[in-house]
Amino acid sequence: MVAVGAKQRGRVAKPPVKAVAKPLRRAGRIAGGEAERNSRELLLAAAQSEFASRGFEGARVDAIANRAGVNKQLVYHHFGNKDDLYAKVLELAYDGIRERERALDLARLKPATAMRRLIAMSFDYLAENRDFVSLLTDENLHKGKHLKQILNLQRLNTPLLGTLDDILRRGAAEGIFRKGLDPLQVYVSIAGLGFFYFNNIYTLTAIFGRNLDAPEAVATRRRHVIDLMMSALRP
């Protein structure tokens, strides 16, 4: 009777509001959350490229926002300031190489195989991630200032030394590696042989007149680094 009366007065009865209000708010939260994550990921990718190409001092927040295609204010919303954004980019760069190392599952492999795979992966990561090389070079110019801000950095990297120590001990027990090798020194040597090559690849190319960035040249260097490290570890 109420509905009929409403029609007679020229009004149309409205559907219940509560039935649609809750799902709409929920959908809005989901969409908003996805947009937030997307803008954060876009900013991190843009920041990595900007910092790698221009260094911390040369990079500009405006340029990072333009690269990401988002509002500049989102940089401050997500990361606080330029220093914190740079530290986050470095943290993710280290997390990337550590994740690749964990995926090797080295503890299950025989010592020689595990060592070869670790050396190869360390070299390949640098070959595939030239931004990582540029970022570390720039951060060393700042004496590790931003890395010191990363609270979980040592916790992220310490397990690697434990795994490497296990490989060296097992190899020594089998008589294929020298005894008493310091896993930190071994890792620095592994990383250094690849890092120096890619950090200086253009100057070395100019000095010696050979394109050391060509695929065949990189493959030759890779084999050399693996053979050199394996020879250095033998008794």
Image: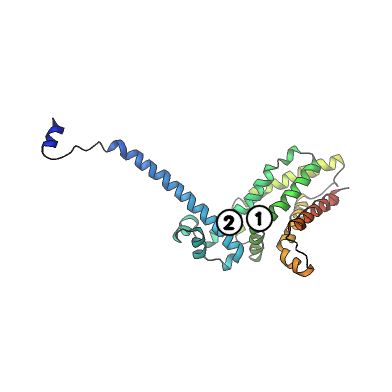
Give whichever of 71, 82 is nearer the camera.
71
Here the colouring is: rainbow
Residue 60, horizontal then vertical, whole percent: 53, 66
Q: Amino acid at mark 2?
A: Val
For numbered disc 1, what is the local secondary structure? Answer: loop
Residue 65 seen anywhere in this rendered image of the structure: yes
Closer to viewer: mark 1 or mark 2: 1
Q: Is residue 104 left or right of residue 86?
A: right
Residue 119, horizontal then vertical, whole percent: 76, 49
Residue 97, horizontal then vertical, whole percent: 66, 50
Q: Is residue 123 left or right of residue 67?
A: right
Q: Amino acid at mark 1?
A: Asn
Q: CA distance from mark 1 to mark 2?
A: 13 Å
**Disc 1 designates what residue?**
129
Give whichever of 211, 38 is nearer the camera.
211
Q: Is residue 56 left or right of residue 224?
A: left
**Disc 2 designates what residue?**
89
For numbered disc 2, what is the local secondary structure? Answer: helix
Q: Residues within 10 Å of mark 1 (few under 14, many from 20)?
A: some
Q: Residues within 10 Å of mark 2 (few under 14, many from 20)?
A: many
User: As drawn, which residue projects farthest toward the bottom?
Assistant: 207
